[in-house]
Structure formats: structure tokens, C-alpha cells
Amino acid sequence: MHQCIGNCEFESDLSYDGSKCTCKPCRNHELCFAWLSPDWFETLEGSCQSCNVQGFGTLEFCDFDATPCPICLNDKARSVKHPAGCNHLVCIDCFREMVFPTRPEYPSTYNFGFKSPCNCCSIVQVQLDQCCEEYHDAEDRWTETSSPGQVAWSIACTFFDHNYDIKCSERPDPMRCPLCRKSMIVT
């Protein structure tokens, strides 16, 4: 089980090790890995925002029998019953990809020649979008130029957006069982 790192109540203290954490796992933790502060746990009735938005309620997780996952054909230890009520079992990894598809990273200006005007923002902060205001202002000005790096970045962003939209439109509907096409009824 993934462990909460305690950043929900102690996010301002980057050295916090999670030892005083009062968080609780989402009731579908095996799927989403989410932890909730006690307030959110009560407000969302035990579901994280992602599971709550999907309308899952409590998913039923179980051990796979001797059969492989019908989607990836791999032997996995754990599965989830599709919430459409058809009792089809799918491995947790395949169900997670249907519900929360992996999104590739958006093209970074840093990789196309934009250099930070300040010395306080490291590449890690840039990747986590935790930069200072001076950095963001300079980056905004850079994106309005016509430098070769900016033009290449703009093309990469357009290509990314187009391909990601296609990927999203082609992905299976997580509300429908991929095996029998029965729809989940959200209450």
C-alpha cells in the first residue's frame, strides 16, 4: 500500500516525514493511491475527488483466479469488478488506465531554449511548476517572441494537443465494461 507522505496538512514544511499524519486512504485506494485528510474523508464520504467525480462508490477488489486479465492477458494478483454491475474482472492496472489515462508531459519551454532569468528556480522546480513570479513573467514574454526555440516549442505544443485529443477520443469509456459494453449507472 502506498503510504501518505503527510503533505496534505503539512505541505508548507518540506522536511516533514509523514510521522504525524492523520490521513486515511480513499476507499478505492488500490486504484487511485489517494489519501485524504480527515475533513476531506468525511466530506467526500471516503472517496478521493477523482473517484468521487467518476461516481464509483466503493469498488470491489478481489484476487484473480487462475485466469489472466481479459484486456492485457497478463497474470495479475489483484483485480477489480467493473462497476457496471456485470461482474467482469479486469486487472487494476488496465482499469486504472481506462479511468485515469497516462498523460504524457506537455512540452517544456526549458527544453526549447528558454533560460531562467533568476537563479532561484532549478530544473526540478520548473518541472513541478513551482517557480517564482519572475520566472513565470519572463517565460510569458518568451512565449510571445518569434525566436527559433519559441517557434519549435509552439509547434511541439500544437502537435501534443492534437495527438492528446486523438488519444482521449479513442480511449475506452470507463463507464462501459470493455467486455460486454454494459454501462455503469451513476447515482
Image (cartoon, rainbow, N blue to C red):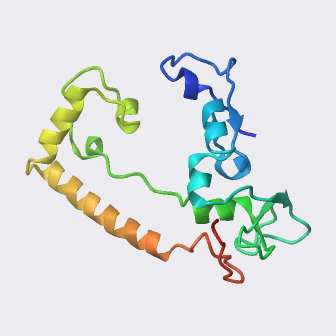
Q: Residue at x 40, y 73 (%)?
A: 166
Q: Residue at x 65, y 22 (%)?
A: 18
Quadrant of the image occupied by residue 4: top right
Task: Indicate the position of residue 154 as horizontal and vertical percent values.
Answer: 21, 56
Could you say which is closer to the camera, residue 100 or residue 66? 100
Q: Residue at x 34, y 27 (%)?
A: 122
Task: Indicate the position of residue 187 as horizontal and vertical percent values.
Answer: 64, 65
Task: Indicate the position of residue 55 as horizontal and vertical percent values.
Answer: 62, 60
Which residue occupies the extreme bottom position in the image? 180
Q: Residue at x 10, y 49 (%)?
A: 147
Whether residue 44 is situated above or below residue 175 in the rendered picture: above
Could you say which is closer to the camera, residue 53 or residue 115? 53
Question: Is residue 19 something one can see in this rendering?
Answer: yes
Question: Is residue 37 something one can see in this rendering?
Answer: no
Which residue occupies the extreme right position in the image? 66
Count all numbered tags in the image, as a single digit. Answer: 0
Task: Indicate the position of residue 50 as horizontal and vertical percent values.
Answer: 57, 51
Residue 139 is left or right of residue 144, and the answer is right
Quadrant of the image occupied by residue 130: top left
